[in-house]
Image (cartoon, rainbow, N blue to C red):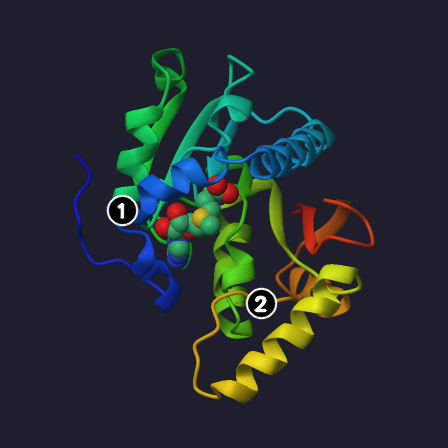
Amino acid sequence: MIAKDFIDKDEFAHKYNEDHARSYYHKHRKSWSSRLSDWREQGMARKALNYVGESKNILDLPCGAGRFWPLLTEKKDRSIIAADSSVDMIKIATEHCPKEMRPQIKLLHTSAYNINLADSSVDTIFCMRLLHHIGDAEKRRKILDEFYRVTRKSVLVSLWVDGNFKARRRYKHDQARDLKNPHRLRNRFIFKREEIEKEFSQAGFSIATHYDFLPGYSMWRLYVLQK
Ligand SMILES: C[S@@+](CC[C@H](N)C(=O)[O-])C[C@H]1O[C@@H](n2cnc3c(N)ncnc32)[C@H](O)[C@@H]1O
């Protein structure tokens, strides 16, 4: 049983209640286009995992609805710490987790700002679809510092970058929405590639490689960072 104790949360993170968790579980499965996109993301993650080589223990943070557990548990000698700041997301993920994967997965209710694990306690941190929600550079630095403390070797992190068709379209769209409603809360952000890469190196990481979802078109990029 996971305690619902106090945890650092951003505005956007409050939406991950039980209803949202259930719809998030189905989101990547419901249409052919979402299944295609999930397939592509899983492929990028597989390449990145192969790139970093042997990782006996991986922190999946945030694990969300456990979308990547089948991939992460493919290697039977690997253990996964599946962590999220939403108890409801963890609950939905475990409800859908196939029995055979369970022995490899330990659950952890924690925040990326303050990871409840010792220094250098995992080989790799696997962080999909979190950083594009964090618009504040100081907050990103706090998360990256925690990643640096907790990983022994590498971090795989996905986020939105500029320099592609979707980013240009999104900038225009965001500008129009800001004009209509200057006080609206934004909960997804596109990063300038050189700026985010500078943030990675300021936190002590080197960039080993990256994978683009669809080069020139899509905003999604998965970075492989090394300590
Ligand atoms: C868009 S989902 C991504 C989940 C999963 N990585 C995936 O790609 O399917 C974002 C997740 O981040 C979690 N989250 C938000 N803020 C967090 C924080 N500060 N620490 C840990 N998890 C957080 C939410 O609860 C949610 O499960």
Using the image, tell me which numbered label, if any, was put on residue 189.
2
Left of 29 or right of it: where is 16? Answer: left
Left of 85 or right of it: where is 121? Answer: right
Badge 1 crowding class, 10 Å Cα cut-off, few under 14, some 14 to 19, many 20 or more, is few
Quadrant containing the N terminus is top left
| Amino acid type indicated by mark 1 | Asp
Q: Nearer the viewer, mark 2 or mark 1?
A: 1
| Amino acid type indicated by mark 2 | Phe
- Location of residue 14 by image quarter: bottom left
Q: Residue at x 74, y 69 (%)?
A: 168
Residue 68, compared with residue 17, is above or below; it is: above
Badge 2 crowding class, 10 Å Cα cut-off, few under 14, some 14 to 19, many 20 or more, is many
| Numbered disc 2: secondary structure | loop
Q: Residue furthest front?
A: 31
Q: Which residue is mark 1?
A: 19
Left of 56 or right of it: where is 192? Answer: right
Measured as percent of width and height from the top left, residue 37 is found at 63, 39
Measured as percent of width and height from the top left, residue 95 is found at 28, 27
Residue 222, compared with residue 95, is above or below; it is: below
Q: Could you tell me how far apart the alpha carbons at marks 2 and 1 are, in whole angstroms? A: 24 Å
**Res 64 visible:** no
| Numbered disc 1: secondary structure | helix
